[in-house]
């Protein structure tokens, strides 16, 4: 299966909340979310430092937003299927929303 198809399948499973909560939260929201937002923030800052045109600056700033939305929805939906204590599902939801807002605005 080509890489694009594998990634599309993963995004569909993630969006639908079909991944375990621990994986959706720790791997995709915290781990990859931090990496993606850090890289795009560095690109954003580099473009500002080079006094680049505002179009690429705005694009670099907005680039991680779709990922952040997908992951927030994924954690929320995965939390609905979490078989453990409700408090952990609720904490994952709240933590992800705070984390993604902070990463998007930072």
Image (tube, grey):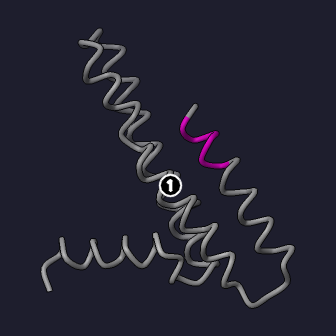
Query: Residue 90, how many percent across, how many down?
Result: 79, 67
The quadrant in which residue 40 appears is top left
40 versus 53 height, above or below: below
Query: Residue 85, how many percent across, how many down?
Result: 85, 84
- In the image, what residue occupies the spot 53% across and 70% down? 27
> Image check: 52 left or right of 65?
left
Q: Quadrant of the C terminus?
A: top right
> Image check: 88 left or right of 37?
right
Q: Is the stretch drawn in magenta largely helix, strand or loop?
A: helix
Furthest residue in direction bottom, as rendered: 83
49 versus 25 height, above or below: above
Instruction: Identify which residue, 101 or 39, lies in the foreground.
Output: 101
User: Which residue is disc 1 drawn over?
Assistant: 33
| Label 1 residue SS | helix
- In the image, what residue occupies the spot 13% across and 79% down? 2
Query: Residue 64, how many percent across, how many down?
Result: 41, 44
Residue 102 belongs to magenta span: yes
- In the image, what residue occupies the spot 57% across and 41% down? 103
Instruction: Identify which residue, 70 or 48, lies in the foreground.
Output: 70
> Image check: 106 left or right of 62?
right
Q: Rate crowding at label 1 as few (under 14), some (14 to 19) or many (20 or more) other CA atoms within 10 Å.
A: many
Query: Residue 77, how many percent across, how many down?
Result: 60, 72
The quadrant in which residue 83 appears is bottom right
Instruction: Identify which residue, 38 or 14, lies in the foreground.
Output: 14
Q: Quadrant of the N terminus?
A: bottom left
Tally of numbered discs: 1
- In the image, what residue occupies the spot 81% across and 74% down? 88
Magenta residues?
A: 99-104
> Image check: 102 left or right of 5?
right
């Amino acid at each position: 299966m080509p890489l694009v198809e594998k990634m599309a399948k993963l995004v569909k499973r993630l969006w639908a909340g079909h991944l375990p909560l621990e994986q959706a939260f720790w791997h995709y929201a915290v781990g990859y979310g931090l990496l993606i937002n850090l890289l795009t923030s560095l690109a954003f800052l580099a473009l500002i430092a080079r006094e680049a045109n505002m179009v690429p600056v705005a694009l670099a700033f907005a680039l991680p937003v779709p990922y952040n939305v997908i992951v927030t929805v994924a954690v929320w939906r995965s939390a609905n299927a979490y078989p453990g204590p409700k408090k952990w599902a609720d904490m994952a939801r709240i933590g992800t929303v705070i984390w993604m807002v902070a990463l998007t605005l930072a």
